[in-house]
Amino acid sequence: MIDREVITPDAQFIRTVKKAGGDTLKKCYQCATCSVVCKLSPNKHPFPRKEMLWAQWGLKDRLVKDPDVWACYQCNDCSKHCPRGARPGDVLAGIRTYTYSNYSFPRFMGKALASPKALPILFLVPIVLLFALMYLSAPLSPAGGFLFLQAGTPIDFNLFLPHHITDAFFVVGNIIIFLFAFVGFWRFWKDLTSTSLNDDFSFRKGLVLTAKEILSHSKFNKCEMNKPRAVAHYLVIAGFVSAFISTGMVFVLIFIPDYIHLSPLWNLPLELPNPVKIFGALGGIGILVGTLWMIIRRWKNRDDVGANGYADYLFLYIIFFTGLTGLLSWLFRWLSGVPLLAYITYFSHLTFVFFLLWYMPYSKFAHMIYRTMALVYLRGKGIE
Ligand code: SF4
Ligand code: SF4
């Protein structure tokens, strides 16, 4: 007796992937050139031809838990060689966008981050919250107005929004958002491993190989068409690590001693050549240069880089403006002597930081976790 599998196409899934940059997916006629030319596609576990077929049929349930979708770095070597112009690299990127929206918790947030219509409200939330915090916590002058607006008061962000308030706001918010994010990541991991996690799988091996791969960008560097993106991507990652170190130093060496009434190592505001400022400035420069490079390449070489969807652009611009406003707020405080300019830039910076961190599970930012999990799974099973 022949086993039959009932296939349930999901037309909405096809429409969403098309909108997310994969609008060429129906052109594929399954010649498999893409799987042959892809340098990251293992002989015994090839992609992206099968993903193209599944996407055409709307097989959402297979694709959202398919680790191969995440083994692709969108170099678009396959898109260049595809005889039908089906652009498999872009289709896989569209599937990845669908995936983190699909697993996100709560789900409506995934939909909001994928829709340009929701952008004003997504910005309005941090603007209103930060404004309320500023309004309620900024110190007042003896005359009753805000001290930071008083003529002759030196520019000090602590007078605009006290650091311990900003700090508490972001720490509490980040804990909540990481719990939400964890729900999505856990759902993905369960689906990923549901069908074939067996004795062959070694989590430790997968983790070590994945860490090496990410740190060296070894797979990314195999790309031909999109090789410069590996360098730009590296700069952005190094920038984030540097910014993370800088924030961590402030927290551990200044805020925590302050809270427990010990003398902090340094007093705010910090200036160059303080190590916190050096790490922060280097991080900001890395993020700015890397993202600007990627944005310019997307404008100039859309065919090589990929016809990316809204979510890709949104993520790039948010990172870029986070780095830009961070550097400018520091420069304006230091050099401009125009308080309003420094405070508005600082407020914008906090708004972008909020957008980046608190919407992380629903935006392309989450790709770093989804890709890492998929790679751990693949490498842990010996698939390279
Ligand atoms: S995407 Fe292009 S190269 Fe790949 S199987 Fe389809 S037609 Fe062939
Ligand atoms: S975009 Fe690059 S990595 Fe992705 S499937 Fe195509 S050739 Fe392979």
Image (cartoon, rainbow, N blue to C red):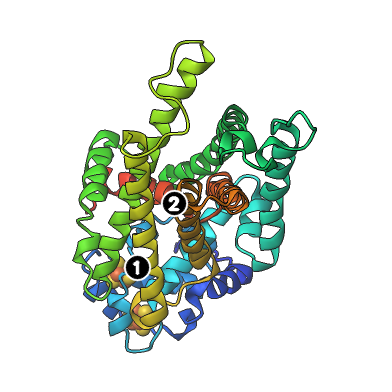
Location of mark 2 (residue): 327
Which element is circle 1 on? helix
Q: Is the residue 255 above or below the residue 286 in the image?
A: above
**Where is residue 272 drawn, in percent x and y?**
34, 40
Q: Given the current orientation, which residue lies at the most extreme bottom position?
A: 83
**Where is residue 41 drawn, in percent x and y?**
25, 65
Measuring 44% from the left and 51% from the top, which residue is drawn there? 327
- In space, the residues marked 1 and 2 are separated at their CA atoms by 17 Å
Which element is circle 2 on? helix
Measuring 75% from the left and 33% from the top, which residue is drawn there? 136
- Give the number of the disc on residue 293: 1
Quadrant position of residue 292: bottom left
Q: Ligand 1 is in which quadrant of the figure?
A: bottom left
Decide if residue 263 is on the left or right side of residue 259: left
Q: Nearer the viewer, residue 244 or 115?
A: 244
Q: Amino acid at mark 2?
A: Leu
